[in-house]
Image (spheres, rainbow, N blue to C red):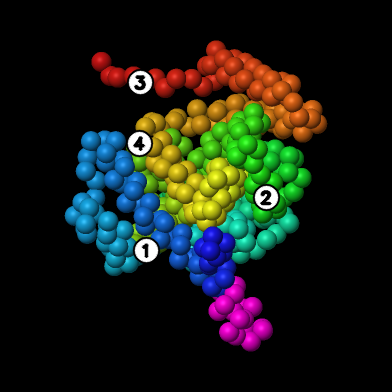
Amino acid sequence: MINTLDQIFVLLKHWIVGLLPGSLGAFVGILLSVAAIVAVFPGLFALTTVLERKGLGRMQNRIGPNRTGPYGILQPVADGIKSLTKEDIVPVSADAAVHFLAPLVLVVVVFMGFSVLPMGRNMQLVDMDAGLLFFFAIGASTELSIFMAGWSSRNKYSLLGAMRAVAQMISYEVPLLMSSVAVVMITGSLSLVKIVEAQNQYTWGLPHWYIFTPWGCAAFVMFAIAATAETNRSPFDLPEGESELVAGYFTEYSGFKFALFFLGEYLGMFSMSGLGTTLFLGGWSAPLAVLNSVPSWIWFFSKVMLSICVLIWLRGTLPRLRQDQLMNFAWKFVLPMTLLNLFVAALWRFMGDGLLRWIVCSAILLGAYVVVGRTEMRRKQYGPRSYRYAE
């Protein structure tokens, strides 16, 4: 019974495929998996928009959406209808073809990233030996779509917003990759399925998740920072700085095209949260051995939604960084720490079991954190946010 609940979607797919001829069955099986991804994550997007608006409302002493449906739960439906019915305005001087393709490329690329994420036991669309490499390779195309949007709009604000976004995403993509390499070094595989299986072990009922090691905790923190910047979330939402760039690279977008950019940003959050869950939080594995009876897909989506809640919390808490703070933080703190963490991961791998490697690896990382942080603060390369008022 427990195994049936865990594999219910896999069994249902195999049952439907078994009713069809061989060649047609294989095609329908792929189609069912794609349809499930296309249905589930936009559904989570709608739920997350309500959760975020209600959560931010509570943080800011507001009620949030409360008019459409019970407790405002149907607000995403109203927003979707509004986006579909609004006029699609394209500037006269814009490159119409590129302007049209930019949001489509963004959404399609993000959806392709979900194909290699193991969302439960035996629940991944494609089990690649180089799944992690595919994820980052396809994810790099998002910079292209953003530049397409800014360049094709023939608007200085849009172009500046696109260039700022591309610079930010490239800067933080390097530490994002480096923090993931530590996991590959320990696991010895680029397969996301094998990375989850390596963490699906227990000692005294406690999991062997990588986040519970010194190098894994450091890599997870750097990954979370870089992923937040990659998805343009607060406090790294400079490409959409209203005070200087109107709405950034999608200033000249309206109607459903604007909604596609909005959808792409949230799907990017889900994608990065799913990858972080897979690399550092055990993927679909249970947090305790006694909880293995709970279906694996529930654990995966629970961890993803917990990550989303943390991102919402950060948005309601932290102010936006300055551009110089953003870039200095990436190149002069996050990147050096991720490179050092690769050395620490190698030490962890070859020092063998025992208390000594815990002490040595923790001391190196804590010492580097203090030294790099203090040194850069003294040089005033980046530091506390300061406010100046006109007298």
Mark sitting earlier along the chain (4/3):
4
Whole-percent x, y for residue 249 in the image = 44, 49
Q: Residue at x 57, y 71 (%)?
A: 11
Mark sitting earlier along the chain (3/2):
2
Task: Return the residue nearer the eye: 120 or 106.
Answer: 120
Q: Is residue 232 in view from this perspective? A: no
Figure check: 186 above or below 23: above
Instruction: Give the number of the mark in front: 2 or 4.
Output: 2
Figure check: 184 above or below 40: above
The CA distance from mark 3 to mark 1 is: 38 Å
The CA distance from mark 1 to mark 4 is: 27 Å
Q: Which residue position is annotated with label 1?
A: 256
Q: Which mark is residue 316?
A: 4
Whole-percent x, y for residue 230 in the image = 53, 43
Instruction: Give the number of the mark in front: 3 or 2.
Output: 2
| Amino acid under disc 2 | Glu
Q: Residue at x 50, y 60 (%)?
A: 107
Helix, strand or loop at disc 3? loop
Q: Which residue position is annotated with label 3?
A: 387
Q: Which residue position is annotated with label 2?
A: 197
Q: Is residue 327 magenta?
A: no
- Report the magenta residues as a range: 14-31
Mark sitting earlier along the chain (2/4):
2
Helix, strand or loop at disc 1? helix
The CA distance from mark 4 to mark 3 is: 19 Å
Instruction: Give the number of the mark in front: 4 or 3.
Output: 4
Mark sitting earlier along the chain (1/4):
1
Check disc 1: other Cα within 10 Å, few if <14, some if 14-19, many if 20+.
some
